[in-house]
Amino acid sequence: MSEGREIFIVDDDPIHRLLMDKLFAKQPKACRLHFFENGQKALDVLKDPGAQQRPELILLDIEMPVMNGWQFMDAFSTLDPALTGMITIYMVSSSFSDEDQERVKQYPLIKGYIVKPIRIEKIIELLE
């Protein structure tokens, strides 16, 4: 993939999306970011067999309108394992909630929990 790695940023906060755009631009690896303001929009692309974008990484916010991060994960886990097995997901939240951090452990497809704001060092680490 010459254009770089495909990454989905699923977050309803326009400030966070702008920050992610700027931080990913500053790190050395080539990436193509796709932004979705709720889980349903990202899920629609993942379910579309003709979609060109197949992310390697999804940074998924918890609190969003229409479909939140947990609802997205419930729907995502029903998709074809050939697809879901190729995607790394991190749950992202501005909350240090112990409850959310424990809940993440119930989803084997979630690789970890990241507290906002995300720093450039974390992005570089995620792309290693």
Image (cartoon, grey):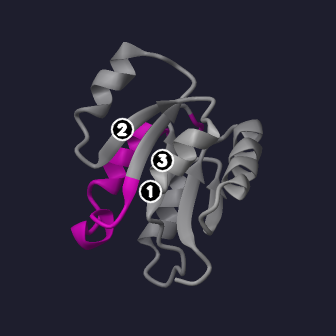
**Image quarter in which the C terminus is found:** bottom left
In the rendered image, residue 49 lying in the magenta stretch gets the answer no
User: How busy is the neighbourhood of tag 1: few (under 14 within 10 Å), some, or many (20 plus)?
Assistant: few
| Helix, strand or loop under label 3 | helix
User: Looking at the picture, which amino acid does disc 2 mark?
Assistant: Gly
- Residue 92, compared with residue 81, is above or below; it is above
- Does residue 106 appear in the picture of this structure? yes
Instruction: Identify the residue under disc 2.
Output: 112
Residue 14, image x and y in percent? 76, 41
The tag on residue 42 is none
The CA distance from mark 3 to mark 1 is: 5 Å
Mark before the other along the chain sequence, 2 or 3: 2
The residue lying at 46 percent from left, 58 percent from top is 57
- In which quadrant of the rendered view does residue 33 lie? bottom right
Q: Are marks 3 and 1 in contact (CB under 8 Å)?
A: yes
Label 2's element? strand
Residue receiving disc 1 = 128
Instruction: Please tell me whether mark 1 sits on a helix, a strand or a loop.
Output: loop
- Residue 7 is left or right of residue 12, and the answer is left
Q: Who's the residue at 37% across and 55% down the image?
A: 88
Report x, y in % for residue 39. 52, 49
Magenta residues, start to end: 64-88
